[in-house]
Image (cartoon, coloured by chain):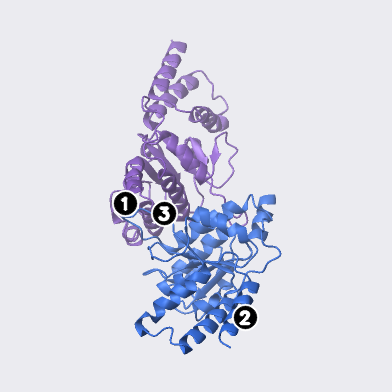
Chain colours: A blue, B purple
């Protein structure tokens, strides 16, 4: 019972964000796996077959509440606007300078900031997350799989990651390193990027058009890797930009 | 690459046994999850909708080979006849005197006898394994879940257990404690039980008819808990019975 109560309070700020999921059946299976491990917050970016989706409710079996309370968004940026830390679940190597964690290590990492809003980001069934979406996440979770058959169902990946988070939560009732700090939200960070990119654009920084996106991703990637990136950090950086461009 | 090769050789004697599965879709999803974690041997006891099952092949996506090579059995005892160690995946508390392991601890336990034939036993979707089937397994694996929503899909449970076994295999290339011993097979153990029960029946040991099954399960349970139960142990015990009943 103590474990259970601990699990609930610990996990209430954990989110799963499905980006452009295709089949309602998979959305339902994701919801069921989430609730098995006491994670209740589902966000969906542009579900292919619209919303609500009857097949999602059917496949969720008893996890109807997770499906019915799912929040729908038009863009990944909007879905992350109030999120403090994002973990992209992706199997492919991306040559991105980001920490790559197993589900087990990710669970331990997540608990260093438990209480903050934290999202596990899962891509569409066919191609997984786009490079741009991964670039906009803080860290990468890779489920270790058989290299000759690595195509894992999105509900399996979600289930394994949620299982690790839930299992980890048992010993960690009130573990919270950053009581006195507020991590920056996705919205604050996005506004900071836009501010920076606007000023860089004005000064011809992105002069090679076809390299613009890569340069933007690299630049954003640097700040995604700042540990404990707080609202105060963002305010400081924006003050610096303002000062430099005056 | 070294990891991969290690994984293959280590896991080739691991089996998943599905007992009376109902939906072909779930059988296919189990096969896919198995192959994701490089476990290839599927056995099925009395599939509800017969065999072969087209839906199982469709849902397995690329893991068709696992479905097509599945072995079908009429009884759980037959499916275990050549298996040395069985782990029952079950959520319910059974008041059985058997070790109950998390998937993580089960993986570590399995690697103490890697190379022997080891089976993960998964029950039907609706009610899970029968008490009798659990009694006939050596140990129990319980996936830790949200107590208020513990109904886990059989492919999710299989996936999580196979994930833990696969992850564990990375550091454990050739770990094998019992090179010089051969663990007893299910068939040898079953013949020993039958021998013992036959003799007990003749002597009126099971005199209260409605308690017979419970007494049988308890008796079998004792021997299921013998660590490293070898073929030699079985021969010794049968020798003892023979001697006592002469």
Work out whether residue B152 can be spotted.
no
Name the subunit of mark 3.
A
Residue bearing the label numbered 2: A239
Q: State the image quarter where residue B36 is shown.
A: bottom left
**Residue A127 at x, y percent in the picture:** 37, 70
In the image, which disc is placed on residue B207? none
Name the subunit of mark 1.
B
Q: Which secondary structure lies at badge 3?
A: loop
Is B237 or B111 nearer to us in this picture? B111
- The vertical placement of A55 against A177, above or below, is below
**Residue appearing at x 41%, y 30% in the figure:** B177
In the image, which disc is placed on residue B66? 1
Q: CA distance from mark 1 to mark 3?
A: 20 Å
Q: Tell me whether the residue at label 2 lies in contact with that at label 1, contact meaning CB atoms closer than 8 angstroms.
A: no
Give the position of the C terminus of chain B as an image quadrant: top left
In the image, which disc is placed on residue A144? 3
**Residue B214 at x, y percent in the picture:** 55, 32
Q: CA distance from mark 2 to mark 3?
A: 42 Å
């Amino acid at each position: 019972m103590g474990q259970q109560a601990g699990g609930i309070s610990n996990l209430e700020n954990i989110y799963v964000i499905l980006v452009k999921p295709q089949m309602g059946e998979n959305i339902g299976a994701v919801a069921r796996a989430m609730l098995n491990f006491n994670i209740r917050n589902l966000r969906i970016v542009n579900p292919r077959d619209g919303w609500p989706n009857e097949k999602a409710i059917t496949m969720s079996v008893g996890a109807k509440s997770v499906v019915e309370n799912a929040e729908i968004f038009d863009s990944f940026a909007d879905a992350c606007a109030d999120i403090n830390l994002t973990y992209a679940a992706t199997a492919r190597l991306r040559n991105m300078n980001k920490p790559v964690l197993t589900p087990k290590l990710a669970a331990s990492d997540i608990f260093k900031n438990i209480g903050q809003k934290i999202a596990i980001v899962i891509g569409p069934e066919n191609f997984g997350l786009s490079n741009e979406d991964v670039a906009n996440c803080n860290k990468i979770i890779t489920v270790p799989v058989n290299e000759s058959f690595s195509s894992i169902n999105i509900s399996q990946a979600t289930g394994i990651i949620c299982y690790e988070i839930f299992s980890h939560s048992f010993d960690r009732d009130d573990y919270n390193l950053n009581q006195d700090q507020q991590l920056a939200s996705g919205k604050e960070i996005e506004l900071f990027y836009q501010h920076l990119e606007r000023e860089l654009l004005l000064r011809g920084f992105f002069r090679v058009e076809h390299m613009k996106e890569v340069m933007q991703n690299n630049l954003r990637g640097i700040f995604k890797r700042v540990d404990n990136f707080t609202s105060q950090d963002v305010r400081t950086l924006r003050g610096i930009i303002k000062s430099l461009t005056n």
